[in-house]
Every structure is written in structure tokens, then in C-alpha cells.
Amino acid sequence: MNKSLRKAVIAGNWKMNKTPAEAAALINEMKPLVADADCDVVLCVPYVDIPAALEAAKGSNIKIGAENVHFKASGAYTGEISAEMLTALGVEYVVIGHSERRQYFGETDQTVNLRSLAALNAGLKAIICVGETLEQRELGYTETLLKYQTKMALTNVTAEQLKNVIIAYEPVWAIGTGVTATDDQANEGNKYVRDAIAEAYGADVAETVTVQYGGSMNAKNAEGLLSKEHVDGGLIGGASLKAADFSVIVKAASK
Ligand code: 13P
């Protein structure tokens, strides 16, 4: 992390976990544990949990996000949720392009870009996920792929809008597997992302963008990962479902 240049952000991604009542209980448990954080703290929760999560987080330093957003403002898109619907509730962040959506729900670099533009145009902060599969890594495509995904996601995003963008480098092989990237692998992936932003917007701008690492980040390995220059925070899956573990990660980012 380099806090003099950019914001440290620890975000939980709850995925398809927790009912509204369980969400409120977990946030109430987390609130006192993260109250002194010297980083931004975000919880991205299932759509149906959002009202309960916002209510539970009221008056605290925890911000609430969604896990996806549709790219159209309204219309005949059964089952979808627009950016305006999220901002109307008071949501501030949204995860876009998570590898699980790319893998299971037909998400492409183009739809990631459209969702990002819709979110940013509505005033949301976008946490855009990129990452290589193990096969792509072994073939030597990691740098090419991360740069391509990053640039595709940011097509037509203005430098002004980029201030509301966080990129999360999430190697697919490290998600939910218990296999974490080494501190150096995480730093290298995050640097490729920053290099891509520098190629598109200039080096000075790229230095100001928060780039998170995600993939089996936990209470034990967070400090090492976050000690790296280009790791400005984390996008946390499993460990964000446990108040004690999540708060240890927040504390590591607060140093
Ligand atoms: P895990 O922390 O469970 O590996 O999940 C990471 C992730 O996908 C966050 O978006």
C-alpha cells in the first residue's frame, strides 16, 4: 500500500450468503470491531440484504455495496437491477465482472464495460474484477490478459470517472480455493493492472487508483499481501463472513 498516493479499501464480497436478518446481525457484530479503521470498509451484499445492511450500518464507517448491476436504466429485463435502483436505496459501491459471473453467467469484457459505465454514470463506485485462470497463467498470458481486461473494462470511462473506480485483481485459481497468491504474485498482478491504467490514462493518474487483491485473503496472510507496494486493499470472500477475521484484515490495512 502507498497511502500517501491512494486510498486503502477493504471490501467484503458476501456472494450468495446471508438472509437479511443474518446480514444485520453480522454487521452489528462487525461495527465495533472496525470502528477505528484507517481505511475504507465496504460490504457488498446480496440485493435482498441491502435495506437491512444499510439500516444496520447506519452511523458507522461501514459502506454498503451490491454484487452486480445491470447496464440499462430500466425496461424489459426480467430479474435485473439498475444502477439508479441501487443509488435510490443509498448504495455506494458495486462489484462488477467477478470471475464467478464471468464463469457461470456469461459475463464478458464488453458487458463488464457496459455495467461499469452504467454504475459510474449513476454515481456509484465500481469495484471491477479482473484475473487470470490457472491455465492462462501457465501459458504465460497473465500480463497480457490483465492488461486487456483492465483496458476493456475502462473503455470510455473518463479520467474524472476513474476516481470512482477500484480494480480488484483476483486470480481465478485463488478464489475460494484456500490457495493464495504469494505476496509477490499479488503485487505483480496489481502492477500489471496499474501499468494498463498508466498506458490508458498516464502514469500520474495510475498512481492514484486503488488496486485491490482478492483470492483467499484471510486474517493470517493479509498483512503480508497488504505490505506490498501495489496492493492497496482487498476484496474478501469467505473471511468477510466472519466478523473477527474480517476485522483483522481491516486492522492490517489500517497500519
Ligand atoms: P475468497 O476470499 O473466498 O477466496 O473469495 C475471493 C473473492 O472472490 C472476492 O470477490
Image (cartoon, grey):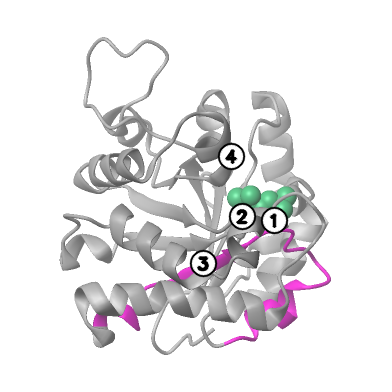
Which is more N-terminal, label 4 or label 3? 4
Which is more N-terminal, label 1 or label 2? 2
Label ID, residue 173: 1
Which tag is nearer the camera, tag 4 or tag 1? 1
Q: Residue at x 52, y 36 (%)?
A: 101
Do labels 4 and 2 touch, CB within 8 Å? no
Start and end of the magenta stretch? 205-228
Q: Identify the residue under disc 2.
A: 133
Do labels 2 and 1 touch, CB within 8 Å? yes
Gap in Å between the C-alphas at discs 3 and 4? 20 Å
Do labels 4 and 1 touch, CB within 8 Å? no
Q: For the residue marked with disc 4, what is the amino acid?
A: Glu
Q: Is residue 23 magenta?
A: no
Gap in Å between the C-alphas at discs 4 and 1? 12 Å
Q: Nearer the viewer, residue 54 or 15?
A: 15
Which tag is nearer the camera, tag 1 or tag 3? 3
Check disc 4 and report its element: helix, strand or loop. helix
* Position of residue 135 measured from the top left corner of the image (x, y, whole percent): 64, 56
Q: For the residue marked with disc 2, what is the amino acid?
A: Thr
**Residue 2 left/right relative to 52:** left
Q: Identify the residue under disc 4.
A: 100
Quadrant into which the C terminus falls: bottom right
